[in-house]
Image: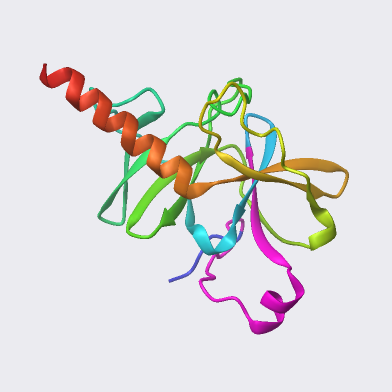
Amino acid sequence: MELPCDLPQLTSDVETEQVKASGVLRVCLIMMGGELFAIDLRQVREVFELESVTPVPGMPASLVGVANLRGTIVPLADLRQSLGAALSMTPRYAIVVRHEAHQIGLLIDEVPEIRAIYPDDMLDSSGLRVNGGRSFLSRLVRVEDRVSGMLEIPSLLASVEESATDVNISESR
């Protein structure tokens, strides 16, 4: 299978021993609402250009619908509002992230970039949880002259699953 030239191939489930020993973390940088975020590359399955989004009635607000990715139905989430990012442009791509057996597509503005984050680039992450809410960010990292939030994929998936369950429970009453 040949990938379009502007989409990077994102495959990495294995860290080399050298990477583990050095503390270097490989991340996928994404843009959502003009804001830069990082995702541990081991949790990224693939990136695809959105052709169509099929809305699903009764889903939580963060789930905008589903997409058919080579016969697999992928739920799509728009996290821009939850993360405080701008809603000004319509996302053109989705990045499929996974944790254990669960996966979800996140709507993104731009095709991602793969980078190595070194221990010196990992910043103090105290204060990420605001107002006692669930944070989707696990830490802050420095990327060149910008600060980026590292998306916490297990927390994100748990939150989406929890809100979908809440919607189903309230509808059945």
Q: Position of residue 67 (x, y in %)?
A: 33, 42
Instruction: Please tell me which residue is depicted at 25% across the width and 55% down the height of the picture.
Output: 71
Q: What x and y, as percent, mark residue 89?
A: 59, 25
Instruction: Tell me where residue 87 sits by quadrant.
Output: top right
Q: Nearer the viewer, residue 110 or 169?
A: 169
Q: Along the line of sight, which residue is nearer the eye, 54 or 99? A: 99
Residue 98 screen position, x and y as percent: 42, 55
Q: Place residue 37 in its image quadrant.
A: top right
Quadrant into which the N terminus falls: bottom left
* 17 within the magenta span: yes
Res 64 seen here = yes
Q: Position of residue 25 (x, y in %)?
A: 69, 64
Q: Quadrant of the C terminus?
A: top left
Q: Is residue 56 above or below residue 92?
A: above
Foreground of the two, 30 or 138: 138
Report the residue that reaches farthest toward the right. 145
The segment highlighted magenta reads 6-31
What colouring method underlies this structural image?
rainbow
Res. 52 in view: no
Q: Residue at x 72, y 78 (%)?
A: 21
